[in-house]
Amino acid sequence: MPELPEVEALRGFLAERLTGRTVRRVLPVAISVLKTYDPPLDTLEGRAFTEVVRHGKFLDLALGGEQDGSRRPDDGVHLIVHLARAGWLRWQDALPAAPPRPGKGPLALRLELTGEPAEGFDLTEAGTQKRLAVYAVRDPEEVPGIARLGPDPLSPAFDREAFAALLAGRRQQIKGLLRDQSVISGIGNAYSDEILHAAKMSPFRLAAELSDEEVTTLYTALHEVLVSAVERARGLSAAELKAGKRLGLRVHGRAGEPCPVCGDTIRSVSFRDSTLEYCPTCQTGGKPLADRRLSRLLK
């Protein structure tokens, strides 16, 4: 799943290519992708992109009034994209002339810009769980997922004191808290593993039980991991971001490999729809955590 660093890199990638450009047409291919109906997607046609903004893991493609003067509204429109678990954005320097056919492959939506050759991007989604989401709204806060977002961890206002205030009194495991978008926006399964490994902290520690020193250690790890990931992703094309993310991860997705810090074997814990990875020596005093899915099978 794309998380804050990859979405931030996509934001920069799209801002360079979209700002000032005009939409020729938007073609939804998969019925499941579009989550709104007012304003309709054809309202975007003839409008120019003014900026690209990130809200947590959401991309906000903002468009101004129409250029031809025929229906120039006072307010703009926002095309909001959430790539979810298996969605991705593929930029094309020359889109096919023929419109895409529904039901053929992973293509979910195509946006075409004016000009020759016609540039634009495709939104695709692999697998059967269709969670890729596109919204056309007049205000980003109309998207429920954006309205409930917690603070952005890369915001200047998100300092150590703000982080400590979020943790105070929460009887919640720190792994789940870091992934809770209503508490902190943008962090998912992969980077929460990386942050906890850098902080040398068990994913099952309770937030309310962390000492002041541990809060400082966790905040420092969070900031350093995310900033480093953003820097690694900066300048990569949309096509390069997935591989770039994988190369930068030290524990997530690397179960069975040696820990790059101590050499111990990286372990995993499986849940219904996700898996966490950690180093026993670095994070849990050398004790492997119980794999709950396996434990149920052994009963």
Image: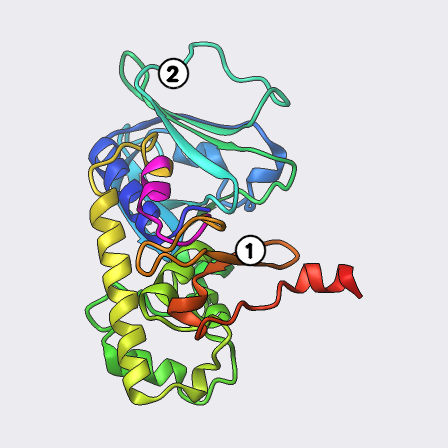
Q: Residue at x 30, y 59 (%)?
A: 261
Q: Quadrant of the image for the C terminus?
A: bottom right
- Residue 101 within the segment the image draws in magenta: no
SS state under label 1: strand
Q: How is the image coloured?
A: rainbow
The relative height of residue 272 versus residue 288 in the rendered view (above or below) is above
Percent across and percent down for residue 40 are 50, 38
Residue 191 position by quadrant: bottom left
Mark 1 or mark 2, which has the lower sequence index?
Answer: 2
Magenta residues (range): 243-253
Q: Is residue 139 visible?
A: no
Q: Nearer the viewer, mark 1 or mark 2?
A: 1
Q: Residue at x 45, y 61 (%)?
A: 278
Left or right relative to 295: residue 79: left
Percent across and percent down for residue 84 are 50, 47
The relative height of residue 31 versus residue 272 in the rendered view (above or below) is above
Q: Report the amino acid beneath label 2.
A: Leu
Percent across and percent down for residue 208 are 44, 87
Q: Is residue 201 visible?
A: yes
- Report how far apart the C-alphas of labels 1 and 2 lie in the structure: 37 Å
Q: Residue at x 49, y 51 (%)?
A: 255
Residue under pointer 1: 275
Left or right relative to 24: residue 228: left
Front position in the image: 45 or 140: 140
Residue under pointer 2: 95
